[in-house]
Each structure stands twice: as structure tokens, then as C-alpha cells.
Amino acid sequence: MESMLNKLKSTVTKVTADVTSAVMGNPVTREFDVGRHIASGGNGLAWKIFNGTKKSTKQEVAVFVFDKKLIDKYQKFEKDQIIDSLKRGVQQLTRLRHPRLLTVQHPLEESRDCLAFCTEPVFASLANVLGNWENLPSSISPDIKDYKLYDVETKYGLLQVSEGLSFLHSSVKMVHGNVTPENIILNKSGAWKIMGFDFCVSSSNPSEQEPKFPCKEWDPNLPSLCLPNPEYLAPEYILSVSCETASDMYSLGAVMYAVFNKGRPIFEVNKQDIYKSFSRQLDQLSRLGSSSLTSIPEEVREHVKLLLNVTPTVRPDADQMTKIPFFDDVGAVTLQYFDTLFQRDNLQKSQFFKGLPKVLPKLPKRVIVQRILPCLTSEFVNPDMVPFVLPNVLLIAEECTKEEYIKLILPELGPVFKQQEPIQASNMILLIFLQKMDLLLTKTPPDEIKNSVLPMVYRALEAPSIQIQELCLNIIPTFANLIDYPSMKNALIPRIKNACLQTSSLAVRVNSLVCLGKILEYLDKWFVLDDILPFLQQIPSKEPAVLMGILGIYKCTFTHKKLGITKEQLAGKVLPHLIPLSIENNLNLNQFSSFIAVIKEMLSRLESEHRTKLEQLHIMQEQQRSLDIGNQMSTSEETKVTPSGTQIDKVFNNIGADLLSGGESENREDGLQGKQKRGSLTLEEKQKLAKEQEQAQKLKSQQPLKPQVHTPIAPVKQTKDLTDTLMENMSSLTSLSVSTPKISASSTFTSVPSTGLSMMFSTPIDNTKRNLTNGLNANMGFQTSGFNMPVNPNQNFFSGTSTAGVTTMTLGAPPTMSNFSPLSIPPASVKQTQQRPPDMSALNNLFGPQKPKVSMNQLSQQKPNQWLNQFVPPQGSPGMGSAAMGTQVNVMGQAAFGMQGNPFFNPQSFAQPPPTTMTSSSSASNDLKDLFG
């Protein structure tokens, strides 16, 4: 079995190759290129049909080829009869011209191996469509194999055949003589065309009203290709050797029966005993009932029965058949109108095209694409008809696949996209295209969109018609997602903005804003911020609709997740623009409320974002400060300065340490700073710092000294005014030092070695008290600097704990200063007698209650360092360094007390004006060093 199939395949391949070679030798090939074998047709399906193109015009054609090898089995005279019959049929077809007859493009050409001629493009013969695949290639095309005739195709096809026969019978006075499915050809558009005039008979008396047609007797000895198909032949051909136009109508009835019965004829004829078969057929026809025609549609069943009647005069003629109700189908009438369209004027055409959209949905897609679409696109050459034809073409395009659209429709739309004349038709075309823009952008390739479709949209935006501009602006958002971003950014958006700014129509301006608002989601965030939002401030009109459009764009940008407005834009541009617009007099209450709601929402977000930012910055600063402190090379606690510390605390703390510890602590501090600057500490230095930290912790954990109980000389006066208290205390101290030659404990500290130095506070009292003499030599004639500073009654200026009570200290000479005269110094031989120290509770209250009260006797009995520890924390304790303390105490001792016999004392330095403000302990120390040398 497999070998037989291979043999058959090789045979078919060989025959195809032979046919192709035979065609190549035919004169037809000089002008036409022959392509693929697609179908077969003609009497006995002897003609092979190839597709082809004309070389000069590239026009598509069908090439009919008869291979003479098919008749090699016949004798020469039989071959000649067959060739003559075939030639006669083609020559007769070539002379006849009618829309229902197959159109010949090139007459018959004969070569040694074949006959060939060219016609209009062909799909297949009706016999091929009905399942007769004789003389077809082994691989039958799926288009033919799966072809199914729709009802409208069948109706209109039979109507076309009837019209063709009517033309032959009435106009040409000719009987076809062989109306069969093989001789009915379906062209590429689906129209049914008649061919096969091999056995046609012309009237012998064409001038008379009743023509007579001679008929040849049936000769069974002739080859089958020299005889008509008996299955579709009228009985009178065989039985009475007569023919007339009614004989073709019988054949039409038999064809109709075969069409509705999948290609089976009504009777099968035994060609060996043709007369007996026809006699039996005659009896069956005389008893033919409706039961035998059940497969035929009821509305045409009676007409088919009449066509198959034994008596020729009973059969309807061709003209009568074209008028039966069966052919009044809407689809058939529509197709018939298209075939006669060239005969109509523009008014009739326009009326027909207006009603066509209601008919198209009722027709099969293949019928529309094959039959209607070519007729519609052919009308594009008529500019006045384009607005009426275009909606139907686009309606068909919706049902087509993208490939069909690109192949069949888009090439025809190219000139229509660019049509601008006449103006009225051009405007109508723009409106139609805009309404179907989503279809165009979906199925049109990107290159063609950029070259043809979008330029038309731009032209619509710039059109003088307000209606077109409004429609364009309303439609753009529906297909914005199909436009590529560069085209939208560089071409579409600028034209929308120009339409908004330059138009005089409020509707166009509002629609422009609405269009922009709807397509914001397809734009880039920064393009919106840099291009769209600044454009809103350029809009000149203040109508409520325009203002609400502006508000809508701001709100869309503000609330959209992908876009968003930065707080800088909100604060700098958006809110300054929106707030004035919100109080326009044209706005009603609801519109004003909309503005205020958006403004409040923007302000709320602005506050929230900026507050969050500041909080984050604060946290980062705190973290950075902690890192900086932790990264300092000196990890001792005394270098950590609390935020509440003040510069004056540093100054006064450094005064006491510098006065009592001298330059040793200062040198130590300088050495430590030098090591910190070098950025590395030795192991011994780190161990030393650790010990100092431990010592500081121990000192913190020690209990404070308990003061001795003593009886006050005078009760402490509780005053509310601290200034009066200070003045009274200082007045008593001054009077005491003047009246007694002894140095009282209230003005000098017994723990300090006697160096002939008298120490006195310069207090801001009245002039009488300020000008008291104090025993200094008046010839020295200089004034000491005084302190002008706020006094905190709860602050101990000599303590290591700093409080945020004083922020700056002003150094300057008071307007009037008391002259210092030499005190009377007791002789060295006279031993100073120890007196009971006066009550210092008032001063203790003044300088703060942080430290426990200690009597001056206790202090005088301690060593100098022990006395200092009562006021200054030891080295290594948190709060301040020893060098800083020494510097501050030195400054205070030199500035606040009179000094005599001090080796660092330089009276000439007082000639320079003292510094007025001290902002840091280091700068104050440097200034005081310069001051005292």
C-alpha cells in the first residue's frame, strides 16, 4: 500500500512538472508569470487553473491550461475533435463580454504540449467547491477543501447564473448547452461566472422573435470531452434531439439540486446505455414530488420542480427566475446592487452607503471581505463619496484580523489619511477617523501610525472647526495608551497646549484641560512637573469651568501614585497659584469648597512631610553628635560637655583652678590637647586616664563634708531682693576693713600665704560706698576691671557643676571705680592673732546652695589643695578640666580682687581696654594672658 502511494505521488509530481514545463513553452508565458496550481474547471474538469501575474502591470490573473498528454490515449481524429471543441468554447467565451460570464484577459494560445489562456483571478470551480477534486494537485488547498457555501452566496450565485443565462437567451440568442457545476467558476471575489461554451448553439434565425436552435444527435462513440455532461442535460436532447432555451433552464434546475445536495446530481446516467437511462429519468421526472426535493429550501422548492419539468414550455425562463422571491434576500440584493454600482450616480450611491452598515452585520465575513470590500475601496477614487464609504470600510476592518487589515484595507486607506480636499469632505473624514481611532491604532503597524495616523490627529487639533477640535480632544484619552511616549511628549501635548491657549472657544479650552488631566497617567512625573504644571499658570481666562479644570489637573497630579507633587513645588508654585484662584468671584460655593479641600489636603501633606524631615534631621544630628563624642581620642568623662553648660561657667570654673594650681594644670591640659591632636595615646596614658576615671567615680560616691555647728553673730536676714542682700554684705565687709588695721577673715583667706595682698570685692553700690579708701597708695591711680553679669542666687561660681543661668560675661570698667591705697601691713614680728570668722551665710546664699557650708576655720586648717577641692572637682571628674579651672580662677582672682606683690602683676596692662565679651573659655584665657603678661 505504501509503495502504491509513493508511486502515485511520484506520478503526480511528474505530471505537475510536465505541465509546468509545457506551460513554460506556451506563448502565454511571454506576458504572464505562471504560479501555483489552484483549481480545475471546464467540461470534465479538463482545464487546470493556475494563479499568475501579468509581467508588465503585475496584475493578478488566472491561467487555464489544458495538457495534451491527457488525451494521448485517444486516436488522432479524436484528439483533433477534443482540441477543436476546447478551442471553440474558449473562443466563444472570449467574444462574449458580460459581468456574469468569465472575463478573458488573454486569448487562447496553443503550443505543442498544451492550450492556455488567461482570465480574471479565479478561486475555483463550483464542482471543486462541491467536492469534485478531479484534476487537482495531490495536496488540495485547505481553502477549497474546507470551503463552505453560505446561503447568501448560494442565492446570489444562482441569481448570477440566471442573469447570465438571461443574457445569453435574450441578447445573444444562444443556448449554452452544458450548464454544469464544472462550467460555473467562482472568481476571487466570490462571484459565479459561466464558462464552457464548447457545445453552445446559436439561433439559426436571430432576427425572428422565436429563435430556432439546431441540435446534434447524441453520439456515444465520441470521447466524453466531445459530449456535454448527460447528468445535467435536458431529456429532449436525447429523446427528441431538440434543444431550446428551456433546455438550459432544466440544466439550471439540476445545478440547483446539486448545490443543495452537496454536489450530487438528481439522476445518475449510465453513459453506456444513455437512451434507457433517459427513458427511466423521464418517468421519474413526471412523478417528481416535493418529497424528492426536501433538501432544497422551501421557498424555492416549487421553482426547482418547475425547472425539472418534462415539458419545456412549463419551465420558467431565465428572466422569470431572476425575479422569484427566493432571490429577494437582503444579502443577495445588496451584492446585486454592488455589481451594478458603476451605473449609479452619487446621490444613489450615498443613499445606499448610508444604509449599508445595517446590512453588513447580517452577511458572512468571507462574503464581505471578498465581495463588498473591493467594491467599497474602489470608491475611494471619488473624493465626494469617501465620507459615505469610509464608515463601512472601518466597520469591516473591525471584523478583520490584523493580517487581513494590513493586507486588504490599510493600503487603500493611505490616500484617505492625507485627503484635505474638498474641505467639507476632509472634515467629515477627520471626524470618522477620530471616532475609530482605537481601531486604527490597534491594528496599524507602528511605522504607519507615526507616518499616517498621528499626523491626521495633529491636523485635527489644528483644524479651524471647533467641532473637530472638541471631538479630537474628547477621543484622545481613549487611545492615549496606544501612542508611543516620544510622540505624545514632543508632538501631541504641545498641540493640546496650543489649542488651549490660542482658541477663542471656552469649550475647546475646557476640553483641552480635561484631556490633559485624563492622559496624565501616561506621562512622566518630571515632565508633568516641569511642563504641564507651569503651563497652567499661563492660561489667561478665569471662567469657573477653566478654573475647575486647572484644579482637576493639580488634584490628579497631587493624588496620583506615580506622579505626585514635591513639597518644594507645593510651597513654591502650586499653592501660590491655587490660593488666589480659590477666591475668584466667579466661583460658586461648591467650587470654592473644592478648591479649599484640595488646598487643605496639600497643606496637610506639606506639614507632614516637612515635619518628618526635620525630625529625621534632628535624630541624625543627635546620632552624629554621639558618634563624634565617642570617637574623640580622650575618652575621659571630663571632656564631655553637656548641652546645658555655658561659657561663663567655664570661665569661673577655670579661675579658681588657675589661681590655686598655677601653671601645672594648664601645662597638663596643653599636653593632653596635644596628644588628642596627634590622634594616638600610649598604653600608659590610657591606663592613667582609666585610673582618673575611677578616682572621679569614687569622689562622686563620697559623702559631702559636714559643716561644723557654729553660732552666727547675727541672724540671717531673709530678703527677697538678692541685690540688696549683696550690697549690705559688701558694705559691712568694706567698713570692717577700713576701721580695723587687721585683715579680717571676711576679706582675706587665711589658707593663702601672706604676700601683702589685700582682696576686696568691687560691688555696684552707691557712690558714697564706692569711693571709700582702702589703704592702697593713691599714686598708683589705676582702675580695675569689674564684672557686669546677671547673678543667679542658686549658682555656686566655684563649683564644678554648671547651670544654665548665665550665658555671657561682660568685662568692662565701670563708670567710676574706687581708688586703691596701700593697706597698712603689720610688721613681720607681730604674729597675727586668729579671730573668729564672721558669718558668711549671706555669701553662701548668694553663690548657691549646692555645696555644704564650711567654716573658714576649717578651710584655714586644710592644705591648699584640700581647700580647692571644696570648690573644684578633682582632675578626672566630670564637668571640667584642671587647666580650664586654673585659667578661670586666675582670671577671677586678677579681675575681681586687688593684687599687690604678685609677680605676674603688670599695672601697665590696664592701660589697654579690657575685652567686652567672652564667648569661650579658651578665648577668654588667651585674652587674659595677654592682659596680665
Image (cartoon, rainbow, N blue to C red):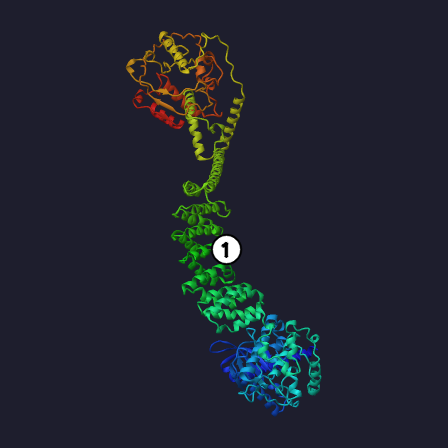
Question: On the image, numbered disc 1 is attached to which residue?
Answer: 478
Between 531 and 822, which is closer to the camera in this rendering? 531
Relative height, residue 663 to residue 395 (above, below): above
Image quarter of residue 169: bottom right
Looking at the rendered structure, the secondary structure element under dot 1 is: helix
Which residue is the extreme one toward the bottom? Answer: 77
Q: Label 1 crowding class (10 Å Cα cut-off): few <14, some 14-19, many 20+?
A: some
Q: Quadrant of the N terminus?
A: bottom right
Where residue 669 sits: x, y (%)?
A: 43, 27
Where residue 34 sits: x, y (%)?
A: 53, 79
Q: Amino acid at mark 1?
A: Thr
Between 360 and 921, which is closer to the camera in this rendering? 360
**Count of numbered tags:** 1
- Residue 658 makes an appearance in the image: no
Where residue 609 sits: x, y (%)?
A: 48, 39
Q: Quadrant of the C terminus?
A: top left
Between 677 and 774, which is closer to the camera in this rendering? 774
